[in-house]
Image: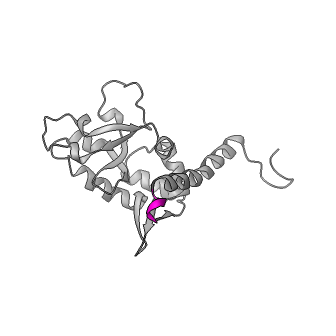
Amino acid sequence: MLSSPGEPVLKRSTLSALNQMTNWTNRLKRWHSRHFADNGSALHLGPSTSPSELHGFKERTQFEWPAEFLELYTKHDGVGVKAPPDDEVTWSFVPTNEIAKFGDSIRDWFSATHPEIAKAFFPFLDWGSGDAVGYIRLEDVLKHPVKGIGPGTLFEFEHECYEFDSSQHWTDFLQPAYESIEHFLK
């Protein structure tokens, strides 16, 4: 057993989930050191999120966020960098209390010409350039399964590729980019 007498016994699945969550911090630190450390910015990890807060978030967004997203946000509700001189946080992984507003700002780019995909796109990762990464509610936009694309696939919106043309296919500006958050962080 993994406990002392009188202590609660943790199930293997619970321990596995806890170990997975513990690794998010290390993965984020490695990601930051590869992409931001040279510019003098410091990693900023948001506070943990309670299960009830995440439940409320899921209800407000009306989206079934993948388990990987929920695990990360349980550990860190937002991930960003602080850069001199003011040390203001620039969010990469947008905090849950800002995701709805952020998502609306990204979807505004194409909601008039592509309303179906706009309703199905749930961005949460901000490139800081007008581009974003997020999930798509696949059942809303794909008539048939596509090999290699699942509910955890991250799609990248590239505003430079968007032409403000309703005849443009949405896959021209919103493309599968990463298999998962873990893949993104590698």
Residue 93 located within the stretch drawn in magenta: no
For residue 117, side relative to residue 163 (left or right): right
The image quarter in which residue 126 lies: bottom left
Q: Residue at x 49, y 52 (%)?
A: 34
Quarter containing the N terminus: top right
Front-most of residues 52 and 10? 10
* Image height of 49 relative to 86, above or below: above
**SS majority, magenta:** helix
In the rendered image, residue 78, in percent from the top left (x then y), is placed at 46, 59
* Image height of 87 relative to 47, above or below: below
Front-most of residues 57 and 145? 145
- Tell me if residue 73 can be seen: no
In the rendered image, residue 167, in percent from the top left (x then y), is placed at 13, 34
* Residue located farthest toward the bottom when viewing the structure as drawn: 86
Magenta span of residues: 36-40
In the rendered image, residue 55, in percent from the top left (x then y), is placed at 48, 53
* Residue located farthest toward the right when viewing the structure as drawn: 5
* Image height of 69 relative to 37, above or below: above
- Tell me if residue 28 can be seen: yes
